[in-house]
Image (cartoon, rainbow, N blue to C red):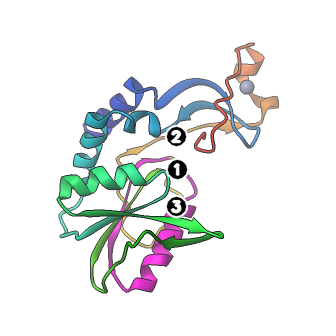
């Protein structure tokens, strides 16, 4: 039921579209995901935060997400948990805590991200957290489109799992059917 509610919110916000899209990789896909489009609505963002908070029975002291995709989702999840929210960001390619954010050893930390594709950004956050000797409770993303392939070595509870077909243009049935191609042109594109 929860996954249905999340999918419904994404579709109403046009954060999840079905159609004929060209990816930055050049592959053609049948879905488009842009979580910023659902998070622009505060009530929907807050509801996603509530659902994320309900995934976890463990005590949590702080929620962290990687900039920029994880910032708003971290904030709304932390608001639902009534704990603090921070974000990490890259400086010279290295994931860091900046802006005076800090973590104390033993703090119980939940990691969040908007969309997990390869899990690269989340893994960078996990390596960062391990340096602080905190207690990593787990990871939640709004969408997991890894096809169950990603392994974080910590508990991972996405709100919605999506299968996306991405194929070369030469094999694309939508091209063969003459359907117009859309190029949203975003890094967050599938
Ligand atoms: Zn195509």
Q: Residue at x 70, y 20 (%)?
A: 174
Q: Is residue 9 left or right of residue 22?
A: left
Marks 2 and 1 in Cβ contact (< 8 Å) = yes
Residue 92 occupies quadrant: bottom right
Q: Residue at x 58, y 43 (%)?
A: 188
Residue 36: x %, y % from top left:
46, 39
- Quickly name the residue at label 3: 150
Label 2: few (<14), some or many (≥20) within 10 Å?
A: few
**First of labels 2, 1 by sequence position:** 1
How many marks the image carries: the answer is 3
For the N terminus, give its image quadrant: top left
> Is the CB atom of the residue marked by disc 2 within 8 angstroms of ligand 1's nearest atom?
no
**First of labels 2, 3 by sequence position:** 3
- Quickly name the residue at label 1: 147
Where does ligand 1 appear, by image quarter?
top right
Residue 46: x %, y % from top left:
25, 42
User: What is the distance, in whole Å, between disc 2 and disc 3 at their CAs?
Assistant: 14 Å
Residue 136 occupies quadrant: bottom left
Q: Which mark is residue 163?
A: 2
Residue 74: x %, y % from top left:
34, 56
Q: Which residues are magenta?
A: 117-144
Residue 154: x %, y % from top left:
39, 71
């Amino acid at each position: 039921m929860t996954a249905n509610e999340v999918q419904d919110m994404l579709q109403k916000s046009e954060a999840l579209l079905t159609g004929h899209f060209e990816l930055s990789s050049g592959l053609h896909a049948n879905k488009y995901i842009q979580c910023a489009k659902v998070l622009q609505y505060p009530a929907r963002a807050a509801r996603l935060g509530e659902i994320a908070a309900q995934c976890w029975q463990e005590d949590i002291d702080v929620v962290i997400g990687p900039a920029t995709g994880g910032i708003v989702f971290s904030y709304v999840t932390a608001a639902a948990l009534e704990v603090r929210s921070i974000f990490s960001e890259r400086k010279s390619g290295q994931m860091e805590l900046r802006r005076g954010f800090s973590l104390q050893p033993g703090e119980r930390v939940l990691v969040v991200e908007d969309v997990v594709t390869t899990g690269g950004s989340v893994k960078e956050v996990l390596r960062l957290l391990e340096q602080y000797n905190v207690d990593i409770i787990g990871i939640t993303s709004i969408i997991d489109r890894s096809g169950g392939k990603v392994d974080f070595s910590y508990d991972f509870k996405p709100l919605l799992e999506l299968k996306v077909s991405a194929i070369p243009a030469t094999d694309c049935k939508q091209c063969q059917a003459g359907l117009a191609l859309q190029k949203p042109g975003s890094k967050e594109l599938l």
